[in-house]
Image: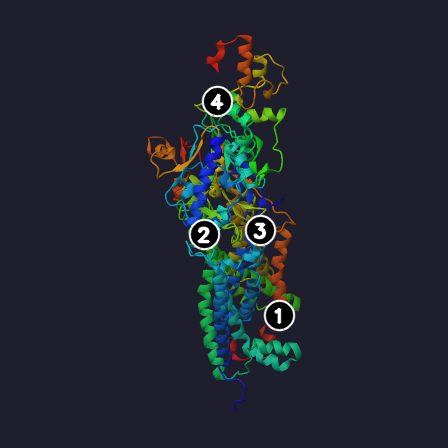
């Protein structure tokens, strides 16, 4: 005689199927709710992400964001051979200086040894990697010795950092020296 | 001074007019940070682009190895633009030194961020045959591996060809970092998401040049529109030059091109 | 600030500045290790349930529960690795059809369902019997685990038997997919010459079988020792046979992969050569190949070619299994970490030494490896692993 069972022979199988179906439906439902609204608008990504990226803060302005307030520097900088050097490379990003049209902080000016390091980023002869359209290269401290100035001189004692040859030319004019122009 | 002001006002007026006319997809422009539009446009016509994507222009990036002097301004500008955490690089500059025995020595201390102040100590000065610099950045591949492998659609390619990262969906699994053949990706320890060079998409969309292009003193980095036959990038890419891309065998089809790329460069 | 990636130190040549980080460290070594053990243990059970290897009966059910204990922990290393674990479900919400990684959530879930169902069906008569023998919370628990059914009529058990055969049957390809897929996650990264080989899924799968069988042998013999019971040596001998077979394939393919790289000698070989004879020399050649592959292979060959006495089997079976477990762990390390030690600059490599207390360091790794054993212990209080503890063991249901 077979014992009597409360459940039918396939009760558990049916229950498992029901549970799996419920889980699947719940899964599909939750997934549908979790997909961001703009997802898939342009491709397999969140469309609004493009807007997020576009609205990233612009921290480096351009020279044009500096010059309106610094007209004297502008005049000097663009008359010299450093006119391709960006303001923000040496001084830092405009966003650290101006926010919402107001000055929030001063930008650093390199001084002393730091200015020498800065100049030598481009003008260091020993690196020997400055290609064809070359810029003026110097070898330190040979350059100081050649020019017969103190060995501890920093670059900005002879060269205006914005227009490197300005003072040199002025000095030469005062001294009546004109011939060396071609060599520069 | 006056003409700049006038220029700004002109740009701004035309721009506001466009917004008012509703020609610009609404949500795109509501949150433009103050100040962005005060700067005169560097890429002409960008502020007239009004769709979700750039339509009229197809941008290319060219790095001219024969011009780069390794000053690192690009790296400085990049770090400033994005506050890139130390030890991670959206762009970097490599130094190649080749000696008379054809040995190649490459280095990039701190990604070239501090410039190159000293020569390599392990190569005798007299034996150096050649030295040159190679700036590296996102190759903005036409077939980007990073987009292919991103499991959640957080790295994506826009219709205008930029490969960007959705900081709000990235899970930082690092699969894209592994998949990028150029190692331009890293996991940003601050946002805890993948990060990489975007060719300054936020600047470009507002008509400004990428930060690195803007500061380069010797025009070793060029950015421009290939649809404009007068543009410098169009001319360079369509005139006889030694032009190549990095690791062409990977099949990623980079849109970053190198002028004067040497066979030693990987 | 310490990043999410571990810091590596330059070893030789020039590594790209961003390559001085190991983005996939110990956690991603553990992930294929754990899923491998899961897949391997499942195969052991299938050898009995599907391929009717009768001598494996004593460990057939245990293998399934063992697989489940590890499966329950397989996602832990991944979650610990993610920079944004709270976004983990993005993988299932917006899976990218082009990503080799996006399928993991689905494959893992499907496999988990099959495994859980198979355990429930196999244990159902036992759960019904235990329900009647227990009280209070345990009674309720057993009732739930029996899916609220008390029907153990021959008709019902025949149905169960059909379902079990079906689940065990589809479980084999699923276990293979689960782990072969993990291999493909690496094998599909074209930028990394150490990973990018079609052999990678095969190697992963074979090493998975090896680690699963070895794991079962070790835990089975330890549990028996602790319980003071007699180990079924026929069962162990069969396991050792399979271990030998799978290990031969595994080791041959591992070496084949290296050999073809060396023989074809593309420009990648130079980098790979520097890697295998540089940062990976000790962990690959000395440890993985020499100590933990060649020696176990010799022991296994000896054990299989000669019929050893019972005492020798009792000593060497767990010993060789432990060595093989280490071999597989080393293989995971050498693949996962090794692949990242060479820079994509193709002219430099880095060193990496894991820290103890990092978020993804050695201590968290140990915790994650101990956790499945804790889960196994808890499960042993619910599911009788061994036939002699089972009130209905004499019934033909388990087959």
Which sits in the foreground, C257 or B253?
B253
Question: Which residue was labeled with disc 3?
Answer: C26
On the image, the x and y values in percent for residue A131 come to: 45, 24
Badge 3 marks a residue whose secondary structure is helix
Image position of B227 (left or right of A182): left
Question: Which residue was labeled with disc 1?
Answer: C380
Q: CA distance from mark 3 to mark 1?
A: 29 Å
Parent chain of label 1: C
Q: Nearer the viewer, mark 4 or mark 3?
A: 4
Question: Quick one: label 3 or label 1, which is nearer the N terminus?
Answer: 3
Is circle 4 on the same chain as circle 2? no
Give the vertical position of C4 relative to A113 (above or below): below
Parent chain of label 2: B
**Mark 1 residue crowding within 10 angstroms, few (<14) / some (14–19) / many (20+):** some
Which sits in the foreground, A4 or C265?
A4
Is circle 3 on the same chain as circle 2? no
Is circle 3 on the same chain as circle 1? yes
Badge 4 marks a residue whose secondary structure is loop
Residue B119 appearing in the image: no
Image position of B56 (left or right of C38): left
Give the numbered dot on residue C105.
none
Q: CA distance from mark 3 to mark 2?
A: 47 Å
Q: CA distance from mark 4 to mark 3?
A: 50 Å
Give the numbered dot on residue B26.
2
- At x 54%, y 24%, the residue is A162
In what quadrant of the picture does the C terminus of chain B appear?
A: top left
Give the numbered dot on residue A135.
4
On the image, the x and y values in percent for residue C142 come to: 60, 77
Which sits in the foreground, A12 or A105?
A105
Is circle 4 on the same chain as circle 3? no
């Amino acid at each position: 005689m077979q014992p009597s069972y409360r459940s039918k022979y396939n009760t558990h199988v049916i229950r498992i199927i029901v549970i799996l179906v419920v889980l699947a439906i719940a899964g599909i439902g939750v997934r549908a709710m979790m997909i961001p609204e703009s997802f898939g608008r342009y491709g397999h990504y969140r469309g609004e992400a493009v807007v997020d990226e576009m609205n990233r803060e612009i921290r480096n302005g351009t020279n044009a964001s500096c010059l309106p307030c610094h007209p004297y520097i502008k005049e000097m900088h663009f008359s010299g051979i450093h006119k391709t050097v960006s303001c923000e490379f040496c001084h830092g990003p405009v966003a650290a200086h101006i926010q919402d049209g107001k000055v929030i902080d001063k930008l650093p000016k390199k001084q002393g040894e730091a200015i020498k390091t800065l100049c030598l980023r481009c003008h260091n002869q020993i690196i020997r990697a400055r290609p064809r359209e070359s810029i003026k290269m110097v070898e330190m401290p040979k350059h100081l010795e050649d020019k017969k100035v103190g060995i501890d001189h920093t670059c900005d004692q002879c060269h205006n950092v914005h227009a490197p040859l300005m003072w040199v030319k002025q000095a030469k004019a005062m001294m009546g020296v004109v011939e060396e122009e071609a060599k520069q | 001074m006056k003409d700049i002001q006038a220029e700004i006002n002109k740009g701004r007026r035309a721009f506001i007019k466009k917004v008012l006319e509703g020609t610009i997809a609404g949500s795109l422009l509501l949150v433009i940070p103050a100040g962005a539009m005060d700067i005169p446009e560097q890429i002409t016509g960008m502020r007239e682009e009004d769709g979700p994507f750039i339509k009229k222009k197809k941008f290319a990036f060219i790095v001219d190895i024969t011009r780069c002097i390794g000053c690192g301004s690009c790296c400085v500008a990049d770090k400033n633009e994005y506050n890139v955490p130390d030890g991670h690089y959206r762009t970097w500059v490599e130094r190649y030194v080749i000696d008379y025995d054809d040995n190649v020595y490459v280095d990039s201390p701190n990604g070239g961020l501090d410039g190159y102040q000293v020569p390599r100590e392990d190569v005798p000065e007299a034996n150096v045959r050649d030295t040159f610099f190679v700036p590296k950045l996102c190759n903005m591949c036409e077939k980007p591996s990073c987009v292919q492998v991103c499991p959640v659609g957080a790295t994506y390619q826009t219709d205008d060809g930029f490969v960007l990262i959705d900081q709000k969906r990235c899970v930082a699994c690092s699969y894209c970092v592994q998949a990028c053949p150029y190692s331009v990706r890293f996991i940003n320890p601050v946002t805890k998401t993948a990060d990489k060079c975007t060719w300054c998409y936020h600047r470009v969309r507002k008509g400004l040049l990428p930060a690195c292009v803007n500061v380069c003193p010797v025009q070793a980095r060029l950015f421009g529109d290939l649809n404009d036959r007068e543009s410098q990038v169009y001319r360079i890419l369509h005139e006889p030059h030694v032009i190549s891309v990095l690791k062409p065998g990977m099949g990623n089809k980079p849109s970053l091109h190198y002028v004067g790329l040497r066979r030693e460069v990987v | 600030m310490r990043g999410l990636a571990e810091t590596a130190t330059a070893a030789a040549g020039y590594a790209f500045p961003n390559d001085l980080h190991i983005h996939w460290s110990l956690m991603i070594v553990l992930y294929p290790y754990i899923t491998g053990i899961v897949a391997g243990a499942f195969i052991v059970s299938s050898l009995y349930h599907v391929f009717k290897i009768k001598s494996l009966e004593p460990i057939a059910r245990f293998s399934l529960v063992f697989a489940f204990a590890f499966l329950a922990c397989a996602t832990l290393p991944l979650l610990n690795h993610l920079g944004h674990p709270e976004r983990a479900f993005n993988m299932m919400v917006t899976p990218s059809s082009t990503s080799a990684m996006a399928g993991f959530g689905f494959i893992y879930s499907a496999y988990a369902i099959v495994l859980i169902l198979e355990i429930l069906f196999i244990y159902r008569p036992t759960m019904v019997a235990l329900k009647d023998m227990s009280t209070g919370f345990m009674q309720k628990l057993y009732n739930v685990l029996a899916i609220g059914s008390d029907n153990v009529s021959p008709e019902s058990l025949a149905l169960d038997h059909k379902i079990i055969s079906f689940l065990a049957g589809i479980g084999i390809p699923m276990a293979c997919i689960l782990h072969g897929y993990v291999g493909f996650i690496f094998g599909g990264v074209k930028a990394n010459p150490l990973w990018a080989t079609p052999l990678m899924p095969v190697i992963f799968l074979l090493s998975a079988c090896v680690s699963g069988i070895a794991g079962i042998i070790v835990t089975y013999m330890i549990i028996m020792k602790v319980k003071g019971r007699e180990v079924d040596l026929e069962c162990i001998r069969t396991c050792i046979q399979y271990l030998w077979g799978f290990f031969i394939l595994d080791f041959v393919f591992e070496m084949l992969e290296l050999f073809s790289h060396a023989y074809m000698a593309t420009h990648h070989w130079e980098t790979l050569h520097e890697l295998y004879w540089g940062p990976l020399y000790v962990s690959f050649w000395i440890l993985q190949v020499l100590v933990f592959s060649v020696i176990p292979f010799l022991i296994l060959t000896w054990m299989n070619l000669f019929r050893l006495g019972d005492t020798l089997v009792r000593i060497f079976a767990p010993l060789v299994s432990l060595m093989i477990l280490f071999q597989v762990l080393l293989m995971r390390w050498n693949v996962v970490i090794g692949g990242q030690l060479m820079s994509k600059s193709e002219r430099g490599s880095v060193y990496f030494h894991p820290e103890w207390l990092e978020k993804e360091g050695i201590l968290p790794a140990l915790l994650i490896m101990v956790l499945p054993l804790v889960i196994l212990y808890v499960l042993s209080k619910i599911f009788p692993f061994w036939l002699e503890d089972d009130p209905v063991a004499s019934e033909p249901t388990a087959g």
